[in-house]
Image (cartoon, rainbow, N blue to C red):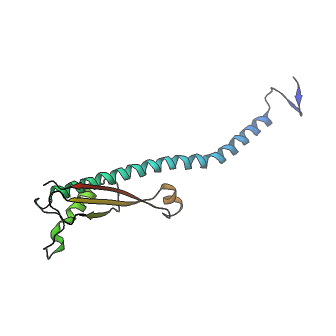
Amino acid sequence: MGRVRGRTMGRWSPARFRDDQAQALVEFALTLPLFLLLVTGIFDVARAVWQENTLAYAAREGTRYAIVHGASGNPIVGPCTNCLNPAANNLGNVITAVTSNAVGVYNIDVTIDYPDGGNNRNQRVTVDATAPFVPLPSQYLLGNAFQITLRGGSQLVIQR
């Protein structure tokens, strides 16, 4: 067989085997962090989509509770114009409905709004639920320095 730069072509040699192992080790060391970053990125996007869908579902359930318990519901939920006690409007029940339906999502802030000013028939109710989302690289490498606020909202019309 022919010789190329002092090596025999087509023959196995221990030096050539060691060179191939070293090259493979260097390539693995260079590509592993990029691969892990890509995998955790895909995992984080899936987690964020799941949490945002959960927030939207929870906000919808809170809005449903508010429209079922409008001015003619029991207990009545909504703005209370003649109440001396602000807790008499039972908005805590809507917040409880949202947080109990947001399984796996924590630190939820709930905003309830009655854009038409009342809780009577054909008036609207809006419930927004927001929660912070911390991607895994930020959680483990940056001490939660990077956060995204996820939001789910719903608006329905009181029918009773």
Residue at 10% across, 59% down: 72
**As displayed, is residue 108 above or below residue 40?**
below
List x then y, in percent, for residue 154: 29, 55
Residue at 56% across, 50% down: 37
Q: Residue furthest bottom?
A: 84
Of the pair 96 and 116, the residue shown nearer to us: 116
Query: Quadrant location of the C terminus?
Result: bottom left
Of the pair 160 and 28, the residue shown nearer to us: 160
Residue at 33% across, 54% down: 55
In the displayed structure image, the side of residue 49 where residue 71 appears, left or right = left
Query: Quadrant location of the N terminus?
Result: top right
In the displayed structure image, the side of residue 24 where residue 112 appears, left or right = left
Picture quadrant of residue 10: top right
List x then y, in percent, for residue 142: 53, 62
List x then y, in percent, for residue 92: 21, 65
Of the pair 98 and 60, the residue shown nearer to us: 60
Residue at 52% across, 46% down: 39
Q: Residue furthest top?
A: 1
In the displayed structure image, the side of residue 51 where residue 29 appears, left or right = right
Mark count: 0
List x then y, in percent, for residue 26: 70, 45
